[in-house]
Image (tube, helix red, strand yellow):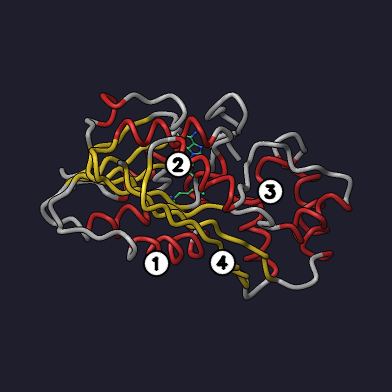
Amino acid sequence: MSVREASDRSPDWDAATYDRVADPQTRWGAAVLDRLPLRGDETVIDAGCGSGRVTQHLLERLPDGHVVALDASPSMLDAARLRLQGNDRVRFVNANLLAFSPADVGAPVDAVFSTATFHWVLDHDRLFHNIAAALRGGGRLVAQCGARRNIDQLTNVVRGLGVERPGSWLYASVDDTVDRLGHAGYVDVDVWTNEEPTPFDTADQLRDFLEAVCLRECLVTMSRDDQRAFLDEVVERMPSRIIDYVRLNIVATRA
Ligand SMILES: C[S@@+](CC[C@H](N)C(=O)[O-])C[C@H]1O[C@@H](n2cnc3c(N)ncnc32)[C@H](O)[C@@H]1O
């Protein structure tokens, strides 16, 4: 696993592995995309585009439009470039959602779309302000990320093994999110959660997924042998091969 730093807090992603295992995120992302009304000629930011699997669906909805594929992780952006190569309607931007400027993304844009990303961004007030600054008046924000109680069961198993998941995620509540969006200047705000229990066919698939996504931050300080033993133990102790995801859904309009 690469431990190159994507930000001060978080190790970089293993983009090739993420791309291989991210079927759940791709499935959720496609469903979230259905909530974004598009004519097909708009410019939309994919905020935290990862390896570009959901970005590809977004591009299909924009036959005459453009996508700004933004991510803080150089390896994720490389994977997205590879996946979407030859498509001149995508612009790749290596930037932190807490630090980008409207000029970085060619603002104002028509919409910002984001899936499986905002919980990795610890300051949601600043996040929503930054996004509002990039949106045109009346532009939409449509997003989904981890909600309060997300993967509680998994976190308890990990804690039972004496390992704390480091505090580099924010699983926000509906009420806090509605307040933050209001303060950041959004109207027609709709925020809700849904449970998304996610089953895996085999223990190997579950282990791969935990390694690449949920537990990647716990693993970086362990030796390869300790990582294997830890992952085996987590899989063994989980009550089933189901990860107890809870998603926070956001639809809002910039005033
Ligand atoms: C789980 S991946 C989701 C990728 C894609 N949206 C999907 O649904 O498959 C989370 C992505 O968010 C990016 N990310 C996390 N924090 C970020 C930040 N502060 N600024 C920009 N990107 C960030 C990570 O680099 C990673 O590519």
The reply to whether dot 1 and dot 3 touch (C-beta < 8 Å) is no
The residue identified by callout 3 is: 215
Q: Residue type at mark 2: give it.
A: Gly
- Which sits in the foreground, 120 or 80? 120
As drawn, the label of residue 31 is: 1
- Which sits in the foreground, 130 or 81? 130
Q: Nearer the viewer, mark 1 or mark 3?
A: 1
Q: SS of the residue at dot 3?
A: loop
Q: Nearer the viewer, mark 4 or mark 3?
A: 4
Tell me how far mark 1 sits from mark 2, CA to CA. 25 Å
As drawn, the label of residue 194 is: 4
Horizontal arrangement in the rendering, residue 141 relative to residue 65 (left or right): right
Residue placed at 47% from the left, 54% from the top?
Answer: 144
Crowdedness near tag 4: few (<14), some (14–19) or many (≥20) residues, C-alpha within 10 Å: few
The residue identified by callout 2 is: 182
The reply to whether dot 1 and dot 2 touch (C-beta < 8 Å) is no
Q: Disc 4 or 1, which lies upstream in sequence?
A: 1
Residue placed at 52% from the left, 52% from the top?
Answer: 145
Q: Nearer the viewer, mark 4 or mark 2?
A: 2
Ligand 1 within 8 angstroms of badge 2 C-beta: no
Crowdedness near tag 3: few (<14), some (14–19) or many (≥20) residues, C-alpha within 10 Å: many
Which image quarter holds the C terminus? Answer: top left
Q: SS of the residue at dot 2?
A: helix
Q: SS of the residue at dot 1?
A: helix
Q: Nearer the viewer, mark 1 or mark 2?
A: 2
